[in-house]
Amino acid sequence: MNLIRNLIGLIITVVLLPLFLLAFRYVAEMEFDYDQINDEIAISQLREQMLISYDLRYSRNVLTFRYKNDSFRLSQVNGMLLLQPGTQIYLNDIDSMYFEKKNGCIYVVYVKKNKEYEQVIVSEKGIYFDAFSFCDVSDRDDDQHEE
């Protein structure tokens, strides 16, 4: 009985082995662009920072804003999308880049390796912290309503 099981397992393995080899060869020949994944991660991190920024002003080449009471500038410098002051690189090896407004959002449009990418980075209106306050503030004394 064990001999029959071993023979059946060996036959199944021999039949499936060429299929596995073809699958491995196919997967090994696939090209994967890690730069595109890195760009997605960087834009996501930029969106997180822009989420709590305020006083947004943008032109075609520069996006300025305030973050934690400091002024920052996002622009292309030497083929990179940089956040200044300091040097925080969000995109690298870009050929060209510009900002544009569509549907109430600010997009960064960049060309990299002859491919154009368009990513939303922030809402044009930004966030107003007063909109998050649900406190009903009034001038009444709470002691007057107690009995």
Image (cartoon, helix red, strand yellow):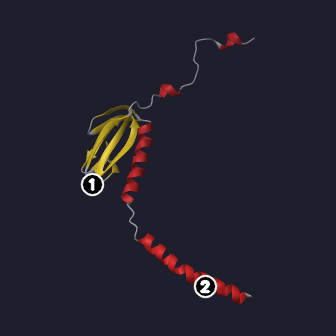
Query: Where in the figure is residue 45, as x and y percent of width and height?
Result: 43, 46
23 or 121, which lies in front? 23
Element type at marker 1?
A: loop
Q: Which kind of residue does numbered mark 2 sit on?
A: Ile
Q: Position of residue 135 (x, y in %)?
A: 58, 22
Residue 36, above or below 62: below
Task: Say above or below: 38 vs 145.
Answer: below
Q: Give the quarter of the image for residue 61.
A: top left
Residue 11 is marked as: 2
Q: Is residue 92 left or right of residue 125?
A: left
> Which residue is at a point 38% across and 34% down the rendered structure image?
103
Task: Mark 1 or mark 2: name the one nearer the start of the chain.
Answer: 2
Q: Position of residue 59 (x, y in %)?
A: 27, 35
Which label sits on residue 114? 1
Q: Along the horizontal axis of the image, is 59 left or right of 33?
A: left
Frontmost of labels 1 and 2 is: 2
Query: In which quadrant will I find the C terminus?
Result: top right
Q: Residue at x 39, y 63 (%)?
A: 32
- Binning the other alpha carbons within 10 Å of mark 2 as few (below 14), some (14 to 19) or many (20 upward) gives few
Total numbered circles: 2
**Which residue appears at 28% of the width and 38% of the height?**
62
Q: Residues within 10 Å of mark 1 (few under 14, many from 20)?
A: few
